[in-house]
């Protein structure tokens, strides 16, 4: 190539102007997006998080599991992003010395009906590109998880456990290290949008942006309505997930991850057994309608938020269609015996004296006016705003892939 031609190539190269981007929400999805943007030279990012530190809600109060995409509907965003997301999350952990362990999971069928569902799920897993799926013989299962009761057990070797709090700490560090901002105690409920820019006020200062990405988790719908001034297309209904902790002297009941066959009607995976990354053992979570979006105990109530959920047409339809499910989950919240019954299905040796009440998390579950729970990730864009409206499990695992998806499809 002549010098002249080289010069032409250089001057013709498209030069992206600097983009100033605000991210609302310092959970794992907001931080993953901000982290990925911070790797791009043409972006300046500022994260606004209402709490005093990152990951105080869903991202810091979950099961700590790396999901590889077993049961998600092939072709759905969840299926695509879980498979890529788990690879990226494991790489991130390796590169940044975050504790994780790809220890594998067994999914356990305990009835004839569940065996059929398990077979369908295994086929889904294969078409989602999972590797190494296999049914365990009685002997293999006994060696791996001696206390499990199974009619059939599927080994999913790519599933794992991770320290999501450690992941988020590293993300915040890397975003700041690259010269970008992470503001805590920064609740954003209003902004001014002109033809050219978005203006956000924080601590009496005005910040100007070209674009905003909202990842507000349990408040994603309200944030959408407040900031875009448009009617929210769905409603977030909070479902608390309560865990029991297995006392240390009974840890041998669980070696890795033990899951029931998920009910394909619901996005919740059912009460499962988890060896956490700190070696503790948890059983749960259930899925109880919460009276407040950030209600971590059954006593937490906010009248406006409760009113917002129970006056929603979709909520009435959901309860009508799922009354038995809702009652069973409520019973497992009120009675340890009822919780234990769910756990005993997988590990019959577990008894009340072996467990104690543990932590809880609240899921932001999007619902539509028909009363259906929206299973897939959902993102909406207005002129200068991108809103991650529904990011249920496995959005923690998939967060880095969700970040790529948002950047490629909505920003570039
Ligand atoms: C009980 C439970 C178990 C789960 N288990 C797993 C699992 O094992 N593996 C997995 O991959 N996924 C799991 N999930 C799902 C996963 O945790 C979530 O999908 C993920 O954390 C969602 O991340 P997020 O950043 O969207 O939401 P969040 O973590 O909730 O973050 C949203 C943030 O936005 C902030 N915010 C809200 N409004 C504003 C505002 N106006 N201004 C500023 N900040 C605001 C909040 O304070 C919050 O920090 C689980 C979830 C729960 C609840």
Image (spheres, helix red, strand yellow):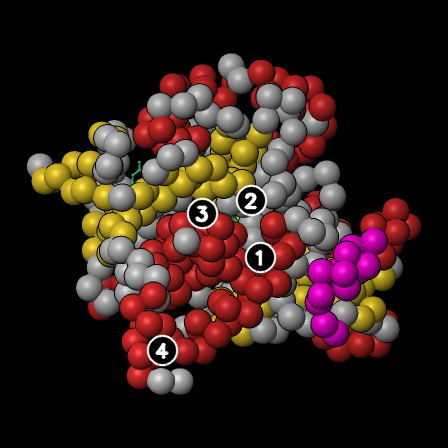
Is 96 placed left or right of 136 in the picture?
A: left
Q: Earlier in the sequence, mark 2 or mark 1?
A: 1
Of tags 3 and 2, the one toward the viewer is 3
Quadrant housing the N terminus: bottom left
Q: Earlier in the sequence, mark 3 or mark 1?
A: 1
Identity of the residue drawn at 32% across and 30% down: 227
Is the residue marked by circle 1 packed among few (<14), some (14-19), or many (20+) residues within 10 Å? many
Q: Is residue 271 above or below residue 299?
A: below
For the residues bearing labels 2 and 1, Cβ distance under 8 angstroms: yes
Of tags 4 and 3, the one toward the viewer is 4
Residue 160 visible, this orientation? yes
Estimate the x, y position of residue 173 in percent, counting from the top left: 27, 66
Residue 5 is labelled as 4
**SS category of the residue bearing label 3:** helix
Is 159 placed left or right of 234 in the picture?
A: right
Q: In the orientation shown, which residue stands out farthest toward the right? A: 112
Q: Earlier in the sequence, mark 4 or mark 3?
A: 4
Secondary structure, magenta segment, majority class: helix
For the residues bearing labels 4 and 2, Cβ distance under 8 angstroms: no
Determine which residue is flagged by label 3.
410
**SS category of the residue bearing label 2:** loop
Estimate the x, y position of residue 230 in percent, counting from the top left: 40, 23
- Magenta-colored span: 120-132
**SS category of the residue bearing label 4:** helix
C-alpha gap between disc 4 and disc 3: 34 Å
């Amino acid at each position: 190539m002549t010098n002249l031609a080289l010069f032409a190539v250089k001057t013709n190269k498209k030069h992206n102007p600097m983009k100033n981007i605000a991210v609302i929400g310092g959970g794992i999805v907001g931080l993953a997006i901000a982290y990925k943007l911070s790797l791009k030279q043409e972006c300046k990012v500022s994260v606004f998080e209402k709490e005093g530190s990152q990951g105080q809600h869903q991202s810091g109060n979950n099961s700590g599991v790396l999901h590889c995409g077993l049961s998600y509907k092939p072709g759905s965003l969840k299926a695509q992003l879980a498979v890529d997301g788990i690879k990226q999350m494991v790489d991130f952990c390796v590169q940044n010395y975050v504790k994780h362990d790809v220890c594998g999971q067994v999914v356990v069928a305990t009835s004839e009906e569940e065996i059929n569902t398990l077979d369908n799920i295994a086929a889904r897993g294969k078409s989602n590109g999972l590797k190494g799926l296999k049914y365990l013989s009685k002997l293999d299962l006994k060696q791996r998880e001696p206390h499990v009761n199974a009619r059939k057990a599927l080994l999913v070797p790519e599933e794992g456990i991770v320290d999501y709090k450690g992941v988020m700490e590293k993300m915040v560090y890397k975003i700041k290290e690259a010269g970008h901002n992470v503001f805590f105690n920064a609740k954003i409920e209003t902004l001014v949008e002109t033809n050219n820019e978005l203006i956000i006020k924080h601590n009496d200062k005005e910040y100007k942006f070209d674009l905003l990405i909202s990842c507000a988790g349990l408040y994603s719908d309200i944030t959408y309505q407040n900031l875009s001034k448009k009617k929210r297309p769905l409603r977030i209904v909070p479902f608390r997930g309560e865990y029991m902790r297995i006392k240390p002297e009974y840890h041998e009941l669980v070696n890795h991850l033990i899951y029931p066959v998920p009910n394909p009607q619901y996005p919740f995976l059912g009460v499962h057994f988890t060896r956490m990354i700190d070696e503790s053992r948890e059983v749960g979570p259930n899925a109880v309608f919460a009276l407040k979006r950030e209600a971590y105990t059954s006593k937490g109530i906010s009248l406006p938020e409760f009113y917002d959920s129970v006056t929603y047409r979709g909520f009435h339809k959901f309860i009508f269609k799922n009354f038995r499910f809702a009652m069973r989950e409520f019973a497992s919240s009120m009675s340890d015996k009822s919780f234990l019954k769910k756990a005993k299905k997988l590990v019959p040796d577990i008894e009340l004296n072996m467990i104690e009440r543990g932590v809880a998390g609240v899921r932001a579950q999007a619902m539509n006016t028909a009363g259906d729970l929206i299973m897939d990730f959902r993102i909406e864009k207005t002129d200068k705003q991108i809103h991650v409206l529904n990011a249920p499990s496995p959005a923690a695992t998939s967060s880095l892939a969700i970040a790529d998806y948002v950047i490629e499809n909505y920003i570039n």
